[in-house]
Amino acid sequence: MELLEPITIILPKLKTVLLAIVPLGFLIFIHELGHFLAAKRAGIKVNIFSIGFGPKLFGVEYDGTEYRLSVLPFGGYVMMEGENPTEQTGAKGEFGSAPLGSRAFVVAAGPAVNLIFGVFAFWLVFNFGLNNSSATFIERLIGQRIGTEKEAVQLGTIAPDGPGALGGLKSGDIIKTINGAPIENWTAFRTRIFTSPEQELEVTVERTGTEQTFTVVPEGVRGARGDSGVLQVISRSKVMVTEVAEGSLAAQVGIQAGDRVETINGQKIYNVPQFNSQIWHPEANWLSRHYQALYHSVQRHPEELHLGIRRGDIAMVVKVPVQWELTAVVPPESAGAGVHTGDTLVSLNGKVVENAMLSAQLWGAGERVELGLIRDGKRDTVELLPHARASDEVVEATGVPYGFGWNATLSGMTFGPPPRDLPTYNLFTAFGKGLEASWLTVETIGRTLRQLISQEVSPKFLTGPIGIANITSRMFDIGFSSALFFIGFISVNLCVVNLLPIPIADGGQLMFFAFEKIRGRPLSLKKQALVQRVSVVLMIALFLYITWFDGLSLIHELRN
């Protein structure tokens, strides 16, 4: 077993690396494939078409082109005859000898293939169906809700001593503008706050039917990319009783699944209350502290909880005794600890567990504990060590003691957001949604570029290859639909960025072709070379700048 241990550690890491790198390499490969096919179509001689970069492993020559596999099999490149202006002889088949339209066609083909693949990826996602996780991710990425009408940008829970509250914002406020710019969705609001640390922002809200403007200053929180802005507010979400256990106290007083929850003990609820193990972390954030306070208000009078609910058009207050049930949530990597997902906790070190404070007790235990569990109707006892090597790694990953967490059910009720009626699409309507998502992606990129130019957003918040690879890997953990959509999103990004008028990009080539068309002759080789050299230096500097912050973010994430 000791011999196998390094393998069991390496294989998951290798899988993560491959899931991160292969999709990005594939997008580069199809980009170069577009150039290759267009060059063949235009009659331009292609000397090399390589899958991967670096030294050649092996190659086969066919029809004047060497098809090779290189050492690093991620991405690829195309080498055309006479592609370098200094090597042009004017011979037929050279890139520089081809008509202007043919050259533009070859250059534009790479970004075009990325755009086509993006639309195709989006089409697949919409065609084969969405779930709540993928729909939520897509909405955050492109800034538009999927399958439901547009919702107002409304504030939910707010930290009472946070920058938002100190600036005058209140739960229930509907955000209209920031510094005069309309805020269409929560992603736009969050991005503007995130990129404006320690800056005064004029926020206009709608409150009780009238518009009011407040000056808020997002707190600067130090992170790997420098300071980022925080208001300590979250968006409002509806709260529903999603499940009621048969025979539970909630069921006995008539609470039903589907009831909307509006108040708990008279306190208005703006977000789904959480009582799980995460909120008891010793370094709990402001939102977890809010849920802790809500828990203590429930425990203050455990004999009778007043729950304000709405059933259809009928509002009522239902009284129910407080009773907690804790069930384990165990990630696969911690399955050997002896606790299984779904186990119900009934005792801790021989004492009956009566409330959700168990999680706080476990955080501070620091010693061997004995848990009494019920699994499949049978009683079992498990002993745990808080610092066992098997669970240390999991603690870093999940942020919970002993490598697993607990969900707390209140009097047999489970709370959650209302289920969403996600639409289904056929082949044709899914294609339309794919086109729409592509356009929204282009709009998102354009908005980011405008903010960079106007210095509203710092380049340090951009994401490079390391960041993209890291996010792609995490998307596969959420689900294949989310990962595929993100890959399509990056593909459309590659299309747009490559079409920017930067001399070393495809857009720069097209810009030179436009000058050639207007002037009737191309720019001199000397001028082209000078512009390209300056552009290369600037692009390398930007690449290193972004990669530096990408690396810092990755290190920060691994440490925390």
Image: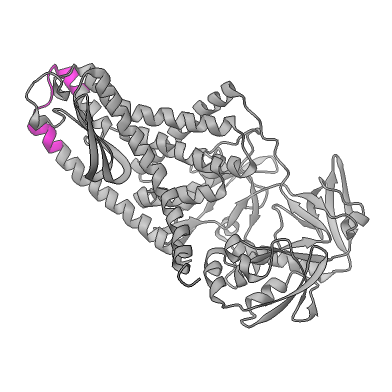
Q: Viewed as shown, does residue 12 lie left or right of 281?
A: left
Residue 386, by quadrant, is: bottom right
| Whether residue 488 is situated above or below residue 374 in the rendered picture | above
Q: Residue at x 54, y 56 (%)?
A: 231
| Side of 498 relative to 321 (left or right) | left
Q: Is residue 254 left or right of residue 100?
A: right
Where in the figure is residue 407, as x and y percent of width and height? 71, 62
Q: Is residue 320 above or below residue 70?
A: below
Whether residue 201 appears in this view of the structure is no
Point out residue 356 in the picture as x, y percentages from the top left corner.
Answer: 74, 69
Magenta stretch encompasses residue 516: yes
The majority secondary structure of the magenta stretch comes to: helix
> Which residue range is magenta in the image?
514-531
Task: Kindly indicate the quadrant of the structure image that contains residue 174.
Answer: top right
| Residue found at x 41% / y 59% | 554
Where in the figure is residue 236, as x and y percent of width and height? 66, 48
**Vertically, is 147 above or below 311?**
above
Using the rendered view, name the quadrant where residue 525 is placed: top left
Farthest-out residue, bottom: 367
Give me the residue at 48% from left, 43% from top.
Answer: 179
Q: Position of residue 79 (x, y in %)?
A: 20, 33
Q: How many marks?
A: 0
